[in-house]
Image: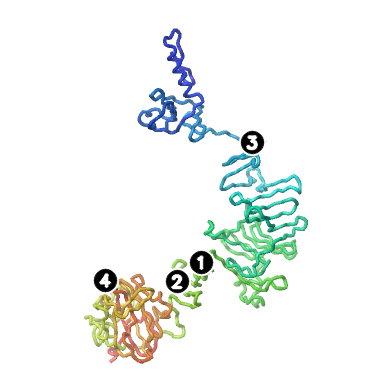
């Protein structure tokens, strides 16, 4: 007995007994494979609780009973599994996917129809069903219409034409929200282009009408009143402004506004043409190449290039030169030739207001709107609103690390200087005698007369408070192993000048747990670790070097201190709070202060406050008569002892 070549149906041999068995087997095969329809595809193992007659397409890596039958048609019949190897060209309908597959000799794949032309269709639906009212229907989230470029036989242009039979008909685009009309644009009953709007899809109003005979634009329901500034852009003259506002983040946008003008290739033109009474005066854009150009004309016929920017280098060229601005322009005091940008008003006589306002707009307070000043493309100064409503001036020496120089609070109009205010009226002093007996060297009272020191001696003029302890941290001399001391020596002396200079000990202060007389700064309590009860007159200058090892330190405000410098920068003790809080990341700092108490005496001389448990290093303290300013690298100031 042999099988047929295509479906493998068993043939009945001559004089065969029980012919009905062979005949029934062939019928079972025909029943399974003709108009093949399967319950599932890519099945790797028999499903549970399978029903009689279940058919499926075995996957590429089957297991169990299905092993060895990859890609075959499996059918559960008469309580057992039967498998049929597919042949190239077999088709199968997958019921749950509503998909028609074809076996290509290697795998089952979706049946695809190669259509290069569709003509005279009655209905076409993409993602939805078309009907008699809408024979062409699309349900999608994006659609792309691209021009056929010249390289593919096209022109590079894209024109979409909407045609009506006659002027009394309508040809328009209707924009809907939840199937209710909101905007309709086009030709509606005549040849005038109209934009109509509706709040409910029933009552419509015309927002704009363009007369094709004159080109005049009419606004039947008027303009929004722009006389009061719009908070999104300072447009102030009614009828003289165009406002481009961002699609806000809260509405699903990005908060940005970008207007894109596109051309097919560099040899085309993409530009903006500014006209006066329909005669060109200025054209800006890309005109025949990739260089940005500004062209001007006095009559709309003869054009000259005013500015050309090379995209390869970023360099700006002025083909017809600069105006000579050495003589001040009466409209704006710009006086240096080639180094100015002139913003001139649209004069009242020309229909403007005579004002000039340059508006920089952001979407919301968390965004930034600023002006960035660069040197060789590296930022140096940035001014504006950066993340909040405070006006800031930030500076950078390298374009990477930035510091705030000035902050203006809009609620109070108060100006603060986070990194202090230099005082150019007072030059650093090079004179002065340390009134402290030990010269701030912590090496004996009085201090040694020699540069070298041998034994640490705690200061008799200091008193520990709030449980603070004082101890020797180490001697400041070249070649030591303590990194903080090496850092201090490098701060106050060049390396080649450190040998033979006056040595001194560094005092370590560890704050205790006492909480007497707290100073609250930025919601944190700081406490004094040291005090000096000596009488101070109406004018002395004091200072020291300090470094936080752990915890935090603040130079607190006090009525007796009239001026404080941190590393030579003046600080407003009542506003520059954040600039006077220090931790282990700040390294060594030098503090100088003027003490001028109204009473002529002060107790608790040092304004230093720390958090409990903080560890701080102090070096080279000094007190000298008079209100003076010392260089930040002065080091230990000698006492009268060394001069006797």
* N-terminal-most mark, 3 or 1: 3
Observer-nearest residue: 295 or 572?
572
Q: On the image, which quarter does residue 120 sit in? A: top right
Q: Tag 2's secondary structure?
A: strand
Q: CA distance from mark 2 to mark 1?
A: 20 Å
Of the numbered discs in the image, which one, if any, rests on residue 118? 3
> Which residue is under mark 4?
481
Query: What is the crowding at mark 3: few (fewer than 14 residues within 10 Å), some, or many (at least 20)?
Result: few
Q: Is residue 313 above or below residue 479?
A: above
Q: CA distance from mark 4 to mark 3?
A: 87 Å
Contact between labelled residues 2 and 3, with CB atoms less than 8 Å apart: no
* N-terminal-most mark, 2 or 4: 2
Q: Is residue 542 above or below residue 512?
A: below
Q: CA distance from mark 2 to mark 4?
A: 33 Å
Observer-nearest residue: 371 or 524?
524
Q: CA distance from mark 1 to mark 4?
A: 50 Å
Q: On the image, which quarter does residue 444 sit in? A: bottom left
Of the numbered discs in the image, which one, if any, rests on residue 403? 2
Instruction: From the top left corner, tell me how far across and down residue 512 is, in percent.
Output: 26, 76
Q: Tag 4's secondary structure?
A: loop
Q: Which residue corresponds to the image point at 67% horizontal and 55% vertical from the top-left?
A: 204
Q: Tag 1's secondary structure?
A: loop
Q: Is residue 623 left or right of residue 144?
A: left
Q: Is residue 114 left or right of residue 92?
A: right
Contact between labelled residues 4 and 1, with CB atoms less than 8 Å apart: no
Q: Tag 3's secondary structure?
A: loop
Instruction: From the top left corner, tell me how far across and down residue 250 is, in percent.
Output: 52, 59
Q: Quarter of the image containing the C terminus?
A: bottom left
Contact between labelled residues 4 and 2, with CB atoms less than 8 Å apart: no
* N-terminal-most mark, 2 or 1: 1
> Which residue is under mark 1?
365
Instruction: From the top left corner, tell me how far across and down residue 286 is, in percent.
Output: 64, 57
């Amino acid at each position: 007995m042999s099988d047929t070549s295509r479906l493998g149906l068993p043939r009945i041999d001559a004089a065969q007994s029980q012919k009905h068995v062979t005949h029934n087997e062939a019928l079972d095969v025909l029943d399974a494979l003709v108009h093949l329809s399967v319950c599932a595809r890519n099945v790797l193992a028999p499903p549970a609780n399978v029903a009689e007659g279940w058919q499926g397409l075995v996957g590429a890596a089957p297991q169990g009973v299905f092993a060895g039958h990859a890609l075959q048609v499996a059918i559960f019949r008469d309580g057992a599994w039967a498998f049929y190897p597919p042949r190239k060209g077999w088709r199968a309908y997958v019921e749950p996917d509503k998909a028609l597959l074809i076996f290509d000799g290697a795998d089952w794949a979706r049946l695809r129809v190669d259509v290069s032309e569709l003509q005279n269709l009655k209905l076409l639906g993409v993602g939805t069903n078309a009907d008699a009212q809408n024979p062409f229907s699309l349900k999608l989230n994006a659609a792309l219409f691209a021009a056929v470029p010249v390289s593919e036989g096209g022109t590079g242009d894209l024109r979409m034409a909407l045609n009506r039979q006659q002027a009394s008909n309508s040809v328009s685009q209707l924009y809907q929200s939840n199937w209710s009309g909101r905007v309709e644009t086009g030709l509606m009953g005549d040849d005038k282009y109209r934009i109509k709007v509706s709040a409910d899809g029933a009552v419509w109003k015309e927002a704009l009408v363009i007369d094709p005979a004159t080109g005049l634009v009419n606004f039947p329901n008027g303009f929004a009143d722009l006389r009061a500034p719009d908070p999104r852009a300072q447009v102030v003259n009614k009828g003289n402004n165009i406002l481009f506002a961002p699609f806000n983040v809260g509405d699903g946008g990005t908060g940005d506004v970008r207007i894109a003008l596109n051309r097919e290739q560099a040899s085309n033109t993409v530009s903006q043409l500014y006209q006066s009474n329909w005669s060109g005066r200025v054209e800006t854009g890309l005109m025949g190449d990739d260089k940005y150009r500004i062209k001007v004309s006095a009559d709309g016929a003869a054009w000259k290039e005013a500015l050309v920017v090379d995209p390869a280098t970023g360099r700006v060229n002025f083909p017809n030169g600069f105006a000579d601005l050495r003589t001040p322009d009466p409209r704006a005091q710009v006086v240096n030739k080639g180094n100015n940008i002139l913003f001139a008003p649209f004069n009242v006589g020309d229909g403007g207001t005579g004002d000039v306002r340059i508006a920089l707009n952001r979407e919301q307070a968390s965004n930034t709107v600023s002006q960035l000043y660069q040197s060789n493309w590296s930022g140096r100064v940035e001014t504006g609103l950066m993340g909040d409503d405070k006006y800031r001036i930030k500076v950078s020496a390298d374009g990477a690390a930035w510091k705030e120089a000035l902050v203006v609070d809009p609620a109070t109009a108060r100006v603060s200087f986070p990194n202090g205010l230099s005082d150019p009226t007072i030059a650093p002093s090079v004179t002065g005698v340390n009134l402290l007996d030990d010269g701030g060297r912590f090496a004996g009272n009085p201090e040694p007369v020699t540069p070298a020191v041998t034994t640490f001696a705690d200061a008799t003029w200091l008193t520990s408070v709030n449980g603070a302890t004082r101890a020797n941290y180490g001697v400041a001399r070249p070649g030591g192993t303590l990194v903080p001391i090496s850092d201090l020596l490098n701060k106050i002396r060049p390396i080649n000048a450190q040998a033979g200079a006056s040595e001194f000990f560094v005092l370590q202060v560890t704050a205790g747990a006492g909480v007497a007389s707290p100073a609250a700064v930025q919601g944190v309590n700081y406490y004094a670790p040291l005090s000096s009860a000596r009488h101070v007159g109406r004018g002395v200058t004091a200072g020291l070097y300090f470094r936080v090892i752990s915890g935090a330190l603040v130079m607190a405000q006090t009525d007796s201190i009239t001026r404080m410098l941190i590393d030579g920068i003046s600080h407003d003790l009542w506003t520059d709070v954040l600039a006077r809080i220090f931790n282990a990341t700040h390294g060594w700092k030098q503090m100088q202060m003027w003490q001028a108490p109204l009473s002529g005496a002060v107790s608790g001389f040092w304004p230093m406050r720390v958090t409990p448990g903080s560890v701080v290093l102090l070096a080279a303290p000094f007190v000298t008569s008079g209100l003076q300013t010392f260089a930040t690298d002065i080091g230990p100031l000698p006492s009268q002892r060394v001069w006797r």
